[in-house]
Image (cartoon, helix red, strand yellow):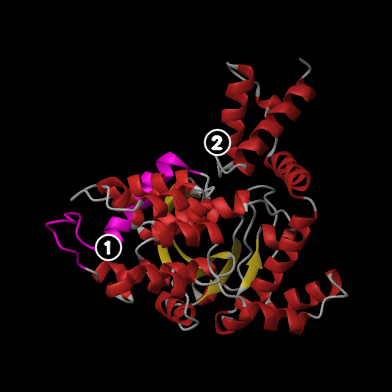
């Protein structure tokens, strides 16, 4: 096999791993790709550069996503400008794939912000009703042949699109950041520069109207998370529900559903949300939950939640034949029975269960990939 052809194949396989989010780092992706294709040692000259892999990722994204990707890129850029305007006191800069256009499924919006107080940035994000998740990473770099360790603070925010805010000290606002891909200075855009870029890139876009529309966008998953959180305070009768609070139960049911139908977003949402009304009206949690979820879930998810209590009556034989026959006539009957099985399996005291943010993130990923 000629080296140039092998190099292209490794680049394409590495791009596939990154596009499908099996790998997030170029080095690991190209190493794994080379191992799969060569099954042995690979010459350094046959390994593609990070730029070659990035270009292959973009080709793959265009092939699979088409015009949808173009529209999403535009919307992400508008969302970036809206967030940067809200964070203007921290001199935000847009970097990364949203600025360069090299997005793929699951890409987030990367911003650099500059402040000597991480808490001030967190407070500014939270003031908009968003829930920031703070991550601190220790990175060891070689500086003048000696190791230097630095802690980077990342603030992850789930709005209409996912954001990653990296906080630097105010004195670093004019520091030249270099790309790990090209070694060149990273492209960055301030609020004013991004606005000029958008007006130039999308001359027919009413930017002010787009910003106003972005401000009105409701993050469906953030609403679902807000509805689920109060379930942690809903204590259940331990004689019948040994798992304890309703949120812990819902997460157990979600995990069981994920084992059965891992890519069925509607079914997974029914599993996670079936008891959401218990924090609203314990006397009729099904009706209360459906009212709160109106407009946020599909007809199939709503039907599964509406009928899920009847599965227990099917099992104990208390449901009448006519009512049971009407259920069986529905195309989602088998899914309802499976949901009931997951519901009963999710009642284990001390069982390991996903965290709520993990469940919500999984639903987002499913929607991004298959929605």
Q: For residue 79, which quarter of the picture? A: bottom right
335 or 58, nearer to the observer: 335
363 or 215, nearer to the observer: 363
Q: Is residue 26 above or below residue 276?
A: above
**Helix or strand or loop: what does disc 1 sit on?**
helix
- Number of disc labels: 2
Residue 171 horizontal/vertical position (percent): 53, 75
Specify the farthest residue to the right: 203
- Looking at the rendered image, the disc whose residue lies closer to the viewer, 1 or 2, is 1
**Helix or strand or loop: what does disc 2 sit on?**
helix
Residue 28, numbered circle: 2
Residue at position x 75%, y 56% in the image = 68
Q: Is residue 320 magenta?
A: no
Residue 198 horizontal/vertical position (percent): 79, 73
240 or 45, nearer to the observer: 240
Does residue 10 appear to the left or right of 203 in the view shown? Answer: left
Residue at position x 58%, y 54% in the image = 367
Quick one: label 1 or label 2, which is nearer the N terminus? 2
Mark 1, residue position:
246
Q: For residue 258, which quarter of the picture? A: top left
Residue 102 horizontal/vertical position (percent): 72, 53
The range drawn in magenta is: 235-262
The answer to whether residue 50 shows anywhere in this view is yes
Quarter of the picture holding the N terminus:
top right
Does residue 94 appear to the left or right of 279 in the view shown? Answer: right
Q: Is residue 252 magenta?
A: yes
Tell me the crowding category of disc 1: few under 14, some 14 to 19, or many 20 or more residues within 10 angstroms, Cα based: many
Residue at position x 74%, y 49% in the image = 65
């Amino acid at each position: 096999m000629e080296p140039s052809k092998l190099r292209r194949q490794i680049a394409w396989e590495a791009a596939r791993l990154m596009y499908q989010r099996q790998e997030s780092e170029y080095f690991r992706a190209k190493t794994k790709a080379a191992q799969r294709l060569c099954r042995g040692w690979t010459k350094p000259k046959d390994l593609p550069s990070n730029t070659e892999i990035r270009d292959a990722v973009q080709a793959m994204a265009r092939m699979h996503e088409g015009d949808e990707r173009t529209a999403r890129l535009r919307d992400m850029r508008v969302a970036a400008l809206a967030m940067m305007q809200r964070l203007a006191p921290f001199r935000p800069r847009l970097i990364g794939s949203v600025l360069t256009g090299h997005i793929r499924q699951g890409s987030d919006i990367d911003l650099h912000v500059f402040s000597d107080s991480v808490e001030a940035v967190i407070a500014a994000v939270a003031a908009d009703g968003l829930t920031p998740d703070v991550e601190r990473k220790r990175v060891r770099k070689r500086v003048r042949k000696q190791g230097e360790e630095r802690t980077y603070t990342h603030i992850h925010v789930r709005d209409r699109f996912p954001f990653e805010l990296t906080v630097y000290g105010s004195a670093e606002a004019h520091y030249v950041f270099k790309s790990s891909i090209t070694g060149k200075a990273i492209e960055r855009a301030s609020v004013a520069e991004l606005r000029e870029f958008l007006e130039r890139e999308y001359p027919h876009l009413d930017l002010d109207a787009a910003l106003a529309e972005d401000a009105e966008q409701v993050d469906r998953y953030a609403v679902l998370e807000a509805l689920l959180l109060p379930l942690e305070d809903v204590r259940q009768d331990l004689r019948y529900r040994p798992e304890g609070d309703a949120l812990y139960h819902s997460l157990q049911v979600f995990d069981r559903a994920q084992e059965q139908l891992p890519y069925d977003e509607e079914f997974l949402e029914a599993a996670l949300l079936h008891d959401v009304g218990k924090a609203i009206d314990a006397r009729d949690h099904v009706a209360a939950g459906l009212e709160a979820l109106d407009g946020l879930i599909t007809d199939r998810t709503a039907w599964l939640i509406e009928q899920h209590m009847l599965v227990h009556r099917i099992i104990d034989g208390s449901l009448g034949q006519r009512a049971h026959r009407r259920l069986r006539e529905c195309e989602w009957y088998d899914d309802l029975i499976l949901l009931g099985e997951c519901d009963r399996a999710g009642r284990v005291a001390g069982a390991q269960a996903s965290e709520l943010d993990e469940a919500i993130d999984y639903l987002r990923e499913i929607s991004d990939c298959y929605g």
